[in-house]
Each structure stands twice: as C-alpha cells, then as structure tokens.
Image (cartoon, grey):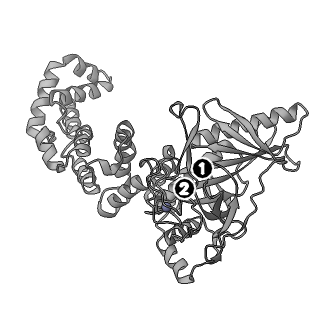
Amino acid sequence: MVKGYEVVIGLETHAELSTESKIYCSCKNQFGLEVNSQVCPICMGMPGTLPTLNEKVVDYAIKMGHALNCTINRVCKQDRKNYFYPDLPKAYQISQSDVPLCENGYVDILSDGEVRRIGVTRIHIEEDAGKLLHSDKFHGSSLVDLNRCGVPLIEIVSEPDMKSSAEAKIYLETLKSILKYLDICDCKMQEGSIRCDVNVSVHKPGEPLGTRTEMKNVNSFSAAVRGIDYEINRQIEILEAGGTITQETRRWDDVKGVSTSMRSKEDAQDYRYFPEPDLLTIVVEQERVDELKKQIPELPNAKLLRYVNDFGITLKEATFVSESVELAGLFDECTAKGKAAPKSYISWIVGDLVKYLNDTGKTIADTKLTADKLIDLVDVINAKTISNASGKKVFAVLLEQDKAVKDIIAELGLSQVSDSAALEKIADEVLAANEKSVADFKNGKTNALGYLVGQCMKASKGKANPGMMKEIITKKLSEM
Ligand SMILES: [Zn+2]
C-alpha cells in the first residue's frame, strides 16, 4: 500500500538470446561489432528475401517456458507486427501474436521472506530492431545501425501480480538468474540484453482496478524501481486532486527521473497483425519438448531450498549464492567433493571471494581459484595447520596465482606452531613480562586471560595455535 492505494504492476521483459547467429539469417549475433558489419539482405529487409527460422531460438524459448512452468504450444505460428520506424527497414517485425510458443506459467519469488507466485501469461519469440545513433558529428541527423536487426528475443509477459517496485525488482532479478542458469542470455544489462516495459495502476482497496499506463525505455532494474515509484506517485497525485488517469504509453527518462507521455490510447498504434506468409508453422515434436526439459539444470529456487534444508545455510546466504550460477557452481562442487561442513565453504564464498569479485569486477573464471583449492584451504584450517587469519592470506594468493595451498603456506611461512615446547617457552616469556596482568587475573579479572593469550599470539607473529596457546596459559596461571 502506498498512501492508502493498492499498486498493481505487470512487466513485459525482453531478453536477447545468445545464439550464434540471428533469428532469420546466418549473420553473427554479437554485440559491439563495427556498425552495419553484421548484416545481409534478409536482416536489412531487402524486398524478395526470405527468412529461415533458427531452430535454436525455439529451443531456448522452450527451455525458458519449462523453467517458468509454462504450457508449451507445440504448434504455433509467427506473425507480422506492422509499424514504421527508421530502425526497422522491413516496416514490420516478425513476432507472435495470438498463439505464443509458451503460456500459462508462473515463477515463485522470495519477497521479504515470503514466497510470492507471479503468473507468467506468455513467452513468445520475435526479432529485435536496429538501433538509431544520435551524435552531433552527424550534423543534427540520426544514423541507423542494423547489426541488431534480427537478433532473437523472447518476450516474457507477466500477469499483473506485483504489488510494489521492490517486488518488480525481485521478479526481474529472478528472471535474470534463471536466464543465466539456462545459459540462453548473457544478461548484460549495459548492452541492453534485458529490457522491460512496465504496466502500472493504482486503486483504493476494495475498488475496481485503476486505469493502467505503460512505461517504455526502462533499461536497468534500478531504473525500473525509480520509474515505477515515480508512476505510482504521479497517478496517486492525479487521483487525490480529483483527476482521472489517462490510458497511455509513457517514456521513462532515467537521467531526469521523470516520465513523459508518448501516445494516448486514442492514437495507439494498430499493428495490423497477420500470419507471416514467408515462414512455416512451427511444429515441435513432443520428444523434443521432453528432451529440452531434461536439459534444465537445478534452478535457483530449488538450490536455495536445498541449501537451507539440507545444509543449514542461512536464508540470506542461500539466496545470495543460489542467485548466481557461478557462485552456486563453485559451492556445489565444494560440497560434492569436500568433506568439511558446507557452512565452512560458503563463508569464504560470500565473504572474501565476493568482496574480491566486487572490488575487481572479475568473474570466478577470471581468477585462479578452483573448488579443489578451496577444499584444501578449508581442510588445512580445520586441521589447525594454519589459523583462520593466515587462511585469508592464502586465499588472497589463490585468487591470483595458480599455486597449491601447501606451497603458499610454505612460501609465506604460515604454518601454525603446534609444538607444545615452543608454545610453553612463549607463554613463560609473556607471563614473566606481564606481572600486572597475571596479578589482575589472580584478583578475578578474567579478561586478563584474553590479553595474555593475545600477547602470546603477537609474540609468535600470529603463528601459534590459538587453542593450544590458551590452554597452556590457563594451565600455567592456575599453577601460579
Ligand atoms: Zn542477416
């Protein structure tokens, strides 16, 4: 509820599929190449050219359909969506209108510790348009790059089941995580691999749904949050002032933090959809649908539950790790091969590793860390060969150099001193040098013990086995 209003949000999310080639021609599907270098007569929309459907696009979309619990329409068609815009040389986009490839699904999201089921109306396949480039260098005109024309997209349409911008963000993050797990989209937000249109309306509890507006040009999840919050407040202000909401399409300007009207319902475009005559009906065999289902890996929600229920990992850590296919992959390999408690691996992953990745902008694959090395590190710490503090030093080396744990320990001279004669010698020296603390301890000031152990650790340059050191000091104090 915002200011006494209930909020209703639905999202249309476009994800670029990471196929080798485009959807209807053999041009390369790759971002960032020289302008208009990845084009051919088909994707440039030359008259007389014929499209051929890239079957991988259908496979990828069906995988997403399975992951989002959809019904797969084994027989479906593609349609022309007609509109004129300079980035679309054919003046129509091939999409799917009345029969999408996948429909009637859902995805569960975790919002404030509560599971919320968000309906997925449909997933359909379509082609992307080109991109207009605006620059002062072009003497005030715009130029068009057609490399993106024909890049395959899936559009995932949600039911209007979200109640806040925070929920919309979690939904988007969940979709992103699933796309990554399925390895069908690179999810590079800065390259526009995932974009969304947002539908928002507000109403008083118990009253019918309000008039909704659609917002376009939302290019990041944080922009979605800002755009939705802006729209909610804008609509409430109008209603509170006695006005009515106009059904319209608005454009979000994330730099200025405002949305402006693009077109109202009256001048909404009529896309004159009709079946694409140059492409065959899509017919997918049941065996292929089943085979694709078998290829779906364990998805983030299932992993999260397994981490919490089987491993006793906290919900927060389990959510964090399961959302990332990379972090979860490392953790899963550690728990499958290693013998230590799963918690001991996860603390390295969510702690030192994530900090390093955030600081450097690297991925795990860019580092030299492997599951086997992390297992070795946890083992030597558990065996008290090195202290946890020394472990951090070893871990820092593991990230950047391809070396074995035992070699790093030897090179850095980090082996813990567990030789009791050596530890006793340190204890005697420290006790002799700290008569006041010893007296304090004898007078009941128990925290003097911690101080004395700390002095011993310092004297050993951090190498003393802290457990043994404490035992020895305690024993000596009791004998004094
Ligand atoms: Zn082409």
Q: Quadrant of residue 475?
A: top left
Dot 1 beta carbon under 8 Å from ligand 1: no
Question: 408 or 222: nearer the eye?
Answer: 222
Question: 134 or 268: nearer the eye?
Answer: 134
Of the 4 image quadrants, the one containing the N terminus is top right
Q: Is residue 106 visible?
A: no
Give the residue type at disc 2: Cys
Q: Is residue 434 above or below residue 3?
A: above
Residue 106 picture location, percent across and down: 65, 63
Left or right of 116? Residue 364 is left
Q: Which residue is mark 2?
A: 149
Q: Secondary structure at mark 2?
A: loop
Q: Which residue is mark 1?
A: 87
Residue 401 picture location, percent across and down: 20, 45
Q: Is residue 75 above or below residue 270?
A: below
Dot 2 beta carbon under 8 Å from ligand 1: yes
Q: Is residue 381 above or below residue 46?
A: above
Give the residue displayed 15% in from the left and 31% down from the top. 460
Q: Secondary structure at mark 1?
A: loop
1 and 2 marks in contact (CB < 8 Å): yes
Q: Is residue 354 visible?
A: yes
Question: 403 or 97: nearer the eye?
Answer: 97
Density class for disc 1 (Cα within 10 Å; few <14, some 14-19, many ≥20) is many
Of the 4 image quadrants, the one containing the C terminus is top left
Residue 220 picture location, percent across and down: 57, 43
Looking at the rendered structure, the number of numbered marks drawn on it comes to: 2
